[in-house]
Image (cartoon, helix red, strand yellow):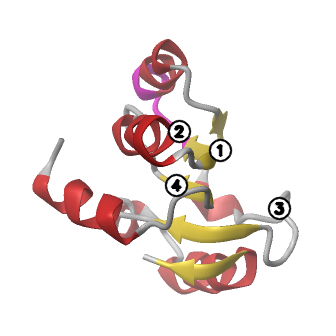
Amino acid sequence: MRADLEIIHDWIPAGSRVLDLGCGSGELLASLRDRKQVTGYGLEIDADNIAACVAKGVNVIEQDLDKGLGNFASNSFDVVIMTQALQAVEYPDRILDEMLRVGRQCI
């Protein structure tokens, strides 16, 4: 696992409900699920990454982050993570506001 993902992994409390924005291949969510009994979802737009998530048994939703997180209720996650997707969104201020709305903590 990438070094930054290991650091983030250590920050997430066991049993948390997590939303990973731009989750890539699902590596972080799979590790959190297996090692910390975390539940949650990854959002991803790339078809190959979605297939990799499915292969790992990671709950993944195909979604464009620029469309927002309107399908999630406020405070529905303990932690919302976005590690390498901020530079890829057209409206970073909007997605940051949405992260703060749906998550109790954001990384």
Point out the tag, 4 or 2, that comes first from the N-terminus: 4
Of residues 53 and 7, the one nearer the viewer is: 7
Pointer 3 with pointer 4, Cβ within 8 A = no
Q: Give whichever of discs 3 and 1 has the lower sequence position.
A: 1
Quadrant location of residue 99? bottom right
**Mark 3 — residue?**
72
Disc 3 and disc 1: Cα gap in Å?
A: 12 Å
Q: Residue at 52%, 59% (x, y): give it.
A: 14
Amino acid carrying label 3: it is Phe
Along the polypeptide, which appears first: circle 3 or circle 2? 2
Residue contact at pointers 1 and 2, CB within 8 angstroms: yes
State the separation of the CA atoms marked 1 and 2. Answer: 5 Å
Can residue 35 be seen here? Answer: yes
Compute the Cα span from label 4 to label 2.
12 Å
Residue 45's mark? 2
What segment is highlighted magenta in the picture? 44-49
26 w.r.t. 79: above or below: above
In the rendered structure, which amino acid carries the disc numbered 1? Gln
Judging by the rendered image, the residue that carries numbered circle 1 is 63
Q: Residues within 10 Å of mark 1 (few under 14, many from 20)?
A: some
* x 60%, y 58%: residue: 18
Q: Nearer the viewer, residue 9 or 92?
A: 9
Check if residue 82 falls in the magenta segment.
no
Residue type (three-letter) at the residue carrying disc 2: Ile
Q: Residue at x 44, y 66 (%)?
A: 12
**Which part of the image, by quadrant, shows the N terminus?**
top left
Of marks 3 and 1, the one in the foreground:
3
